[in-house]
Image: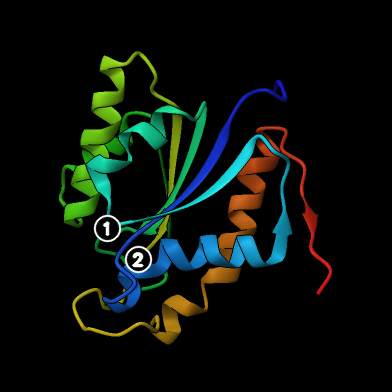
Amino acid sequence: MATSEHVMVLGVGNILLTDEGFGVRVVERLEQTYAFPDNVSLVDGGVLGIHLMGTIASADHLIVVDAVRNRQPPGTFHRLAGDAIPKRILAKNSLHQVDLLEALTLCQALDKVPQTIILGVEPEDIESYGVDLTPTVQAQVDPMVTRVLQELALLGVTYRKKVP
């Protein structure tokens, strides 16, 4: 990968609805634990959806981290890429995911659609109000950080662990 290519890790979700905040929590852990080169950005996208279009369009490679419902046991890992992304998001996991698809689609009008991968875990609870993830999903934060780092390594991104 050329060092000039912009790689973005985008955590999305509502941190006020328990497991819905999973993607944001993973990006927070990445920010706290690792240092990345200047061409890598970590973004807390919250529930901004369509409003992320300009941000998304700035990336050459996009790794989205989110809670993804796929009728599997809570904590199950999901990796969506290529044609699987619109099909899964159109199943309407949550409103921000539909908006995220629209933002990616609108990026086509700008002729700037990043290569996109969605990494997620099956949530246990995305309806209850609470800022803490359920124990099942919380246990998947560090494994997801590892998976994000693996995806970054496939793109040729180097990183280092921060010294506490």
Q: Where in the figure is residue 56, as x and y percent of width and height?
A: 40, 34
Report if residue 38 is visible in the image. yes
Q: Do the residues labelled 1 and 2 touch (CB within 8 Å)?
A: yes
Q: What element carries label 1?
A: loop
Q: Where in the figure is residue 126, as x and y percent of width and height?
A: 24, 73
Identity, as a three-letter code, of the amino acid under mark 2:
Glu
**Residue 142: assigned label:** none
The quadrant holding residue 67 is bottom left
The quadrant holding residue 65 is bottom left
x 20%, y 56%: residue: 93
The C terminus appears in which quarter of the rendering? Answer: bottom right
The reply, left or right, for residue 142 in relation to residue 119 is right
The reply, left or right, for residue 22 in relation to residue 145 is left
**Residue 122: assigned label:** 2
The N terminus appears in which quarter of the rendering? Answer: top right
Q: Mark 1 points at which residue?
A: 70
- Furthest residue to the right? 163
Viewer-proximal residue among 116 and 112: 112
Question: Could you classify mark 2 by the number of other residues whose Cα lies within 10 Å: few (under 14), some (14-19), or many (20 or more)?
Answer: many
Q: Where in the figure is residue 22, as x and y percent of width and height?
A: 41, 67
The reply, left or right, for residue 160 in relation to residue 106 is right
The quadrant holding residue 13 is bottom left
114 is higher (above) or lower (below) than 77: above
x 45%, y 39%: residue: 117
Identity, as a three-letter code, of the amino acid under mark 1:
Asn
Mark 1 to mark 2: distance in Å? 7 Å
Report if residue 73 is visible in the image. no
x 64%, y 42%: residue: 152
* First of labels 1, 2 by sequence position: 1
Q: Is mark 2 on a helix, strand or loop?
A: loop
State the count of labels.
2
Viewer-proximal residue among 58 and 64: 58
